[in-house]
Image (cartoon, rainbow, N blue to C red):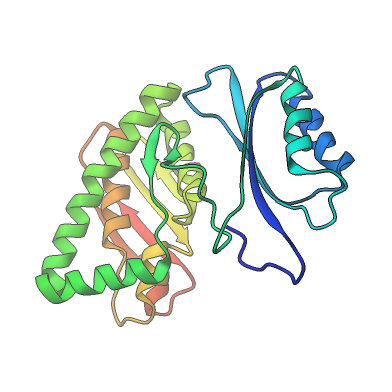
Amino acid sequence: SVDVVRPGEQLHQICIVLRDVPGALAKAAMVLADANINIKTSSSFFVTEYPNAGVWSSFIDISNATKSLEDVEAELRKLDVVLEVILKEPKPAPFESIHFPIFHGNTRAIIMPRGMFWALWNAFEKIFAHSGLVVVLYNAGKRIGQHAANRISEVFGLKGKELIEALAQAGQATGWAITEIKEIDLNRASATIIVRDCFEAVAWREKPYTVCHWTRGYLAGYLSVVFNKQVEAKETKCLAKGDEYCEFVIK
């Protein structure tokens, strides 16, 4: 969504399905430029419904447009690279509402603001007590980490060091954290991993103890697959308790 709409702007959302060929996006963008339509935000992605195409989705400002949206849509549909055009005026608020559900790869995903996540975890802690919540989060994280490592290994054919490097990529792509591999020993099945801006630590804020139990479990599960051996993880530093970053020792 567009958080700030300037006075006088008239926002619309446009979604264009384009053939997967070079120059397709440029051709569509030129139609908007020729109509003096300003592209405010833009993203392009693949969807399974169109295996040989891609989706370009944008918020556009039509306040200074020299052509009607009907004429622009007609011009776009005449392009040999365009398969579909969807136009929508986002009212009463400029939220992205064309694309539902949201997918991360081929898996449905949701976007949860940090404050909502914190409220959920805080409520769980009151029900289970801190010690109970630690066990629940760690075990859940471990199962999910194992599943993620197996899935990434299967889809991309990665093993060993490359599978560990994919862990850092995936964490950043999903907004969880920035992950750095400080030490790794494949023979001894041990590792030290630095996690910066971990979503758990940022959500929990100031605590006198380490809080990233889901992340800790996830790393243990993921690296158990990498090492082909069950390992556990311990958080030795945590942003929530004043450290510069979170650090996990896995062995």
- Give whichever of 116, 144 is nearer the camera: 116
The location of residue 35, given as percent across then percent down, is 86, 42
Q: Position of residue 73 (x, y in %)?
A: 72, 34
Does any portion of residue 17 appear in the rendered image? yes
Whether 247 is drawn above or below 105: the answer is below
Asked if residue 237 can be seen in this view, the reply is no
On screen, residue 64 above or below 231: below
Q: Residue at x 72, y 59 (%)?
A: 10
Which residue is rendered at x = 45% and y = 24% of the image?
A: 156
Q: Please tell me which residue lies in front, 65 or 81.
A: 65
Question: Left or right: where does residue 122 sit relative to residue 55?
Answer: left
- Left or right placement of residue 158 versus residue 57 in this view: left
What is the tally of numbered marks visible in this picture?
Answer: 0
Identified at 28% across, 77% down, the residue is 209
Q: Position of residue 141 (x, y in %)?
A: 25, 51
Q: Is residue 149 above or below residue 235?
A: above
Is 135 positioned to the left or the right of 220 in the image? left
Q: Measured from the top left, where is residue 49 in percent x and y?
A: 47, 23
Q: Residue at x 49, y 42 (%)?
A: 99
